[in-house]
Image (cartoon, rainbow, N blue to C red):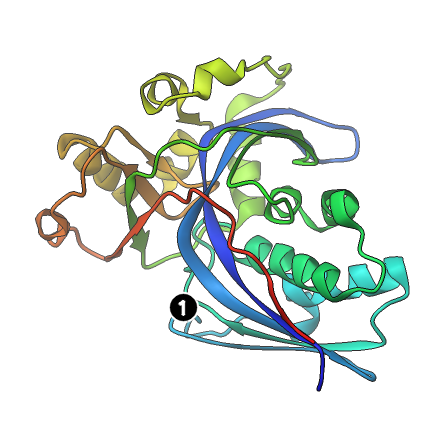
Amino acid sequence: MTASARVTAQAKINLLLRVLARETSGYHSIETVFLRLDLGDDVTVRITASGRTVDCDGDAIPAGGLGPPEQNLALRAGVTYADATGWPPGFAIEIEKHIPVGAGLGGGSADAGAVLRALDALSPNPLGARLPELAGALGADVPFMALDSPMSLAWGRGERLFPLPVLKPRPVLLAIPNFAVATSDAYAWLAASRGEYVSQAAVISPDAVATWEAMAGVAANDFDDVVAARFPILLVIRDDLRRHDADIAMLSGSGSAVFGVFTTAPNIGVFAGTPDAQWIETRTAVRVVRVEPNQ
């Protein structure tokens, strides 16, 4: 039987996202609180004798597709793992996408993290706790997605992680506009709005994010204003969520999705009149879905 593993690649939101000074390398350091959602892509990884492939399907595939396979972050994750460890000889990745693309929900990063976790579950010499370190080369969200923690503080380029006790599950409403926001554009807009900018990461106490009430007091996203300045509908959606009792409502990552976290599940019907947006109901996750190997 061919060895394979299946796992749900869970989406994420950033309950706090601060973008700090740009480094000489061109990268920005961040300070963030990651939290997984129940919403996720279905990822299957099969070990093969040779070749490295990725196939994607699902209701979240955009009309224009996902671009060249070699640029797919899940495929790059498999290549990174194989090149770093010398195993496996080949692999085939299948992804059924449910996380909207280009929405700041970490869909590509979640798929990459799922591939790393699946390969490590099948490996004869797993990396274990070293997996997030390998993930760092793939993007700021991927180390968290390779970690067995539903909620974490993160600094630097996302590679410095401090797992947090997970908050009680809350209903989440996602508004997905009919456009995507490129992360590179969002960073460029933010840099242009700031000019010369120097900032140091604050030391966030875990107590400051230990309850939803405390979290609501510090929740913020540095991309909110600069992205919404280009797409005013995002402000309309955010304010609508707040008017209907969202405890936290803001842009997800660098956008374009806007999320609302509620104490009790909202009536999604009251948002139906918002133009050009798809609404998705989900919940905050209390666990990371386990990899299911089949060897």
Residue lying furthest right in this view? 86
Residue 174, placed above or below residue 170: below
Q: Is residue 238 visible?
A: yes
Residue 92, placed above or below residue 122: below
Image quarter in which the N terminus is found: bottom right
| Quadrant of the rendered image containing residue 191 | top right
User: What is the x, y in percent for residue 75?
Assistant: 69, 68
In the picture, measured across the screen, residue 235 lies left or right of residue 230, that is left
Choose between 50 and 258: the one closer to the eye.
Answer: 50
Residue ID for mark 1: 60
| Quadrant of the rendered image containing residue 84 | bottom right
User: At 83% across and 83% down in the image, what residue appears?
Assistant: 50
User: What is the x, y in percent for residue 86?
Assistant: 90, 65
Residue 205, placed above or below residue 89: above
Name the residue type under label 1: Ala
User: At 41% across and 38% down in the image, what residue appears?
Assistant: 227
Image quarter in which the C terminus is found: bottom right
